[in-house]
Image (cartoon, grey):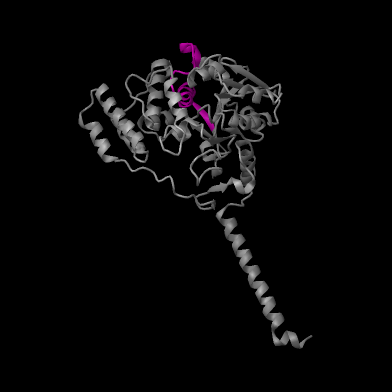
Amino acid sequence: MTNQDIKFTVIIPTRERADTLKWALKTCVNQDYDNLEIIVSDNFSQDNTREIVESYQDKRIKYINTGKRISMSSNWEFALSHVTGDYVNVIGDDDGMMPGAFTKLNDIIKKLNAQAIFWDKSRFHYKWPSMTFPHVKNSLEVSFSDSEIEKIYTQEILDKLQTSDSGYATIFTMYSGTTSYELVKKISSYTGQFVNSMVPDIYSGVVIACEIDFYYYSGTPYSIQGTSSHSNGASSLGNDNFNPTPYINFLQENNIPFHRNLEFAPSLPLIIAECILQAKDHLPSAKNLNVDLVELISLTMKSAQYLPSNKWQDCVNAVNKISEINNLKDDVATRAILKYPNQPFNSESKPIFGINPFSRTGIFNCAEYGVSNIYEASILLDHILQLEKNGYFSGKKQYMDRMYAFIERINLKLKRLYRESSLFRGNI
């Protein structure tokens, strides 16, 4: 790696979400880094998306339009074909980049000569005001980490992913990491395209893990996750509090069929398994990957037990179909369904705002800080992380603060008692 600044590309796939895109784009435009390409890949929006993009008048922005409505995976592929940067990452149109992200990534990548570096953006999660859950909208959840930079060996992650979903938190995806564009082109060369799954973000993590021996994990976030009324993931939950349209559109407009050995349902273990099997079919480096279908059926129902009843039933239907397709024993799906009965999550539970120094987590009511979008949330988070770095949220710090406050109260009381005493009055 030379001393020259790396050229980064950040891709924002979007479709008729100008209200959130405006602020996601602002987190990119306000980066203190010139050698940056910001690709807004517009999936044939019929709202004012183009006007919002052009209003920034920033030479680093590249606006492209698909010209017709295509699937999410196809929009990713379309955007990737326009990249001119050395490293590339993707953010959702309700997500955001953290202040100074690319300046810091430039330094880290050059120092480590890293092909890929990622962070767990889900640990820093902003809920937009458009969220219909009344108790969590316009809130920011944080989960602090001691890990600055850690080397992650990809074979260990792939081993975990093949037997459970426990590797998901430590798998690189292009939604929460940046990778060499040369690596993206190498993976694309096998089949003529990079994405071969209907779930491009998780698929990107699986195929990149197959192609390199290790990547780096940063406990410091360089992007922030946002969930709004537009979010596909939230929409897929099927709860009355979420807009079902994004999820319906996602399914109807998909042009990459779910893997033939599986059946789609809103289940993370099932989606991870699908990406593994698609990688196995399309990459030479993934030919030894496999999925334990019996374990998958159990994990699918385990992950579904707290979903709304209609989505739990979708998972029931899926595991029965998977059992049938793969000629599994008749009782495999039945046992899993009985073991994990539906217990829908109570969406009315209220969060407790503030910092828990012992679990090192916190929830902030953003309205108290005048925050109402992902751009402002990224700035608030940046300040929170600085305070945490300086020890302000640690258990020791809070204990010492309480101790000092207690001692000061005692001192004030002693002074008052002393001044009120007869001995003190007699000396006046």
- Horizontal relation, residue 8 to residue 216: left or right: right
- The image quadrant that residue 82 belongs to is top right
Closest to the observer: 294 or 117? Answer: 294
Q: Is residue 139 above or below residue 81?
A: below
Q: Residue at x 49, y 49 (%)?
A: 351
Closest to the observer: 218 or 72? Answer: 72
Q: Position of residue 56 (x, y in %)?
A: 69, 26
Q: Position of residue 231 (x, y in %)?
A: 50, 32
* Quadrant for the C terminus in the image: bottom right
Q: Is residue 319 above or below residue 358?
A: above
* Quadrant for the N terminus in the image: top right
- Horizontal relation, residue 203 to residue 388: left or right: left
Indicate whether residue 197 is drawn in magenta: yes
Q: Please count the marks in the image.
A: 0
- The image quadrant that residue 167 belongs to is top left
Indicate whether residue 189 is drawn in magenta: yes
Query: Can residue 325 be seen?
Result: yes
Query: Can residue 299 be seen?
Result: no
Q: Which residues are magenta?
A: 187-216
- The image quadrant that residue 203 belongs to is top left
Q: Residue at x 42, y 17 (%)?
A: 256
